[in-house]
């Protein structure tokens, strides 16, 4: 089992920045991702990182604005969000895999077995 705890959400004005964090404990991690879910919508992929090599991938909607990173020693995952837009408003969830890493289907929520409780990000216009 892997236990995840997110933090760092809040209210920010459009154009501002925010960093959300995720603390992981338990099994060895092979990769981590961030997803988000706005009211009335399905959970959508935001970004993912391969734990060992640090290779990353992003949704088109956040490419160039968001940065996912990890601290191997602390078992922490971060999502730095810059140039925030009102449409970025959502609950942000950290997800983790412990099986050998594969990029296949990474953007699908059902491929991630471990989830945090979510942290709310609100961007005002």
Image: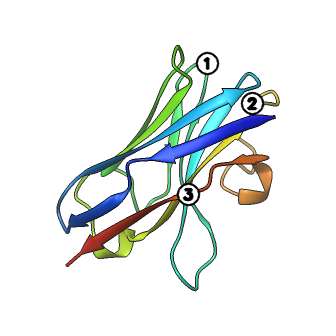
Q: Residue at x 52, y 43 (%)?
A: 57
Question: Looking at the picture, how far across and down is residue 16, in whole percent?
Answer: 18, 58
The residue where tag 1 is placed is 52
Judging from the image, the colouring scheme is: rainbow
Pick the quarter of the image with the C terminus. bottom left
The picture places residue 83, in percent across and down from the top left corner, at 22, 58
Q: Is residue 41 above or below residue 58?
A: below
Quarter holding residue 124: bottom left
Q: Is residue 84 visible in the rendered structure shown here?
A: yes
The span from disc 2 to disc 3 (Cα, nearest Å) is 23 Å
Looking at the rendered structure, the number of numbered marks drawn on it comes to 3
Question: Of tags 2 and 3, which is closer to the observer?
Answer: 3
- Viewer can see residue 81: no
Label 2: element kind: loop
**Dot 1 alpha-carbon crowd within 10 angstroms: few under 14, some 14 to 19, many 20 or more:** few
Q: Earlier in the sequence, mark 1 or mark 3?
A: 1
Residue carrying label 3:
118
Identity of the residue drawn at 63% across and 49% down:
116
From the viewer's side, name the closer residue of 93 and 105: 93
Direction from residue 102 to residue 19 in the image, left or right? left
Q: Are marks 1 and 2 in contact (CB under 8 Å)?
A: yes
Residue 119 drawn at (x, y percent): 48, 57
Q: Secondary structure at mark 1?
A: loop
Q: In the rendered image of this protein, does residue 69 appear above or below residue 89? A: above
Q: Which mark is residue 101?
A: 2
Q: Nearer the viewer, residue 14 or 3?
A: 3
Answer left or right for 24 relative to 102. Answer: left
């Amino acid at each position: 089992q892997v236990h995840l705890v997110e933090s760092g959400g809040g209210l920010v004005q459009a154009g501002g920045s925010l960093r959300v964090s995720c603390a992981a404990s338990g099994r060895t991690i092979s990769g981590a991702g961030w997803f988000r879910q706005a009211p009335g919508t399905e959970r959508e992929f935001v970004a993912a990182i391969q734990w060992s090599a640090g290779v990353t991938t992003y949704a088109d909607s956040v490419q160039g604005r968001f940065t996912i990173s990890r601290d191997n020693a602390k078992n922490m995952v971060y999502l730095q969000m810059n140039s925030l837009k009102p449409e970025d408003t959502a609950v942000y969830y950290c997800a983790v895999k412990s099986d050998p890493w594969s990029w296949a289907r990474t953007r699908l929520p059902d491929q991630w077995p471990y989830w945090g409780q979510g942290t709310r990000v609100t961007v005002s216009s």
